[in-house]
Amino acid sequence: MILEKSCGAVVFAQEGGERLYLVERMAKGHTSICKGHVEGAETERETAAREIWEETALKVAFIDGFRRTIRYSPYEGCLKDVVFFLARADGTETRPQPEEVESLEWLTLPRALTVLTHESDRETLLAADEFLAAHPELDSFRPMRRAERALPRGECEKTLARCSSGVLALRGDLGWPYAVPVSYVCAGGKIYFHGARTGQKPEAARKYPRASFCVTERDDVEPEGFTTRYRSVIAFGRLRELTEDGEKRAALEALAEKYNPGGSPDRRGRYIDAEYADTCVLELEILHMTGKAN
């Protein structure tokens, strides 16, 4: 059995307060969502971003949380997986790839559903629109301006794992921005912080759960070039306080293991028990994340 794989994305943009989806009219005669074959050691998102750029000349920002796989047999003895993501374009100006794409159109959801050739594409588009409707805050994140410096999702996660501290940005007292340096640990696509149960940080998190968190792994000044060589990640999401004993203790165990790797579990347990009642643990569910390097 031959196994093939392609990756692409449902691409959307906002224009005049309306959400529009990108549809490709292909040279072969069908109408499709942007996608293409994986090349070499590319990640799924790298393939999708490359295909979008090659076919449309668009820079896009991927929306975290949406991934849909379609499996079918293009010919006897072959199974093909097509992985679709969701991506926001930084504008609506496009340039179709002349060898493959006849034209590109930005359409409303109802119109796009009527022109797509394949039912699987229509189902994917509808699923993407429903995902955005269920998560309206995701539609507000801007694409990165310097997209050529963007880090892939996997590199963002590695950077978060390597760093030991970052800055948590909240809405503080009287609406003033409140950015506080914190220790943290990442696990399962979420970021965990701990601290006292009282104070501006936990009180702001309970009242205004939207937050962002930034880490800087590298910041090397190059005086001759009037620049720096840097690597940083920003995560956006919603905070919640962990109150259930099992998940709160698991987060504290993960924090203790990160900052005391290989230490005695009994000693960690005694330390957690001594501070447990007075400790607040916050979980940031990552809704959007970008990384940048120069």
Image (spheres, rainbow, N blue to C red):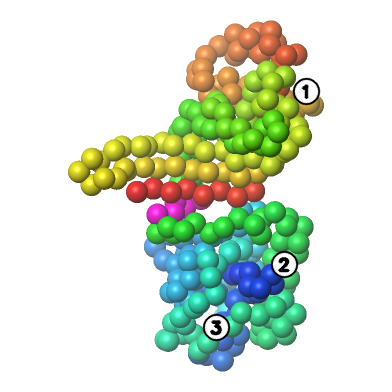
User: 185 and 188: which one is in front?
Assistant: 185
User: 243 and 3: which one is in front?
Assistant: 243
Which residue appears at 50% of the width and 89% of the height?
Answer: 102
Q: Residue furthest right?
A: 244
- In the displayed structure image, the side of residue 151 where residue 248 appears, left or right: right
**Highlighted magenta segment, given as a residue range:** 149-153
Q: Earlier in the sequence, mark 3 or mark 1?
A: 3
Task: Inspect the image, locate mark 3, and give the three-letter code of the amino acid beneath it.
Answer: Leu
Kindly identify which residue carries mark 1.
Answer: 245
Q: Is residue 133 magenta?
A: no
In the image, residue 88 lies at what x, y percent?
A: 58, 64
Can residue 7 be seen here? The reply is no
Question: What is the quadrant of residue 211 in the picture?
Answer: top right
Kindly identify which residue carries mark 3.
Answer: 104
In the image, residue 213 lies at what x, y percent?
A: 57, 38
In the image, residue 164 lies at what x, y percent?
A: 48, 28
From what the image shows, is residue 7 above or below residue 157? below
Task: Inspect the image, locate mark 1, and give the three-letter code of the amino acid beneath it.
Answer: Asp
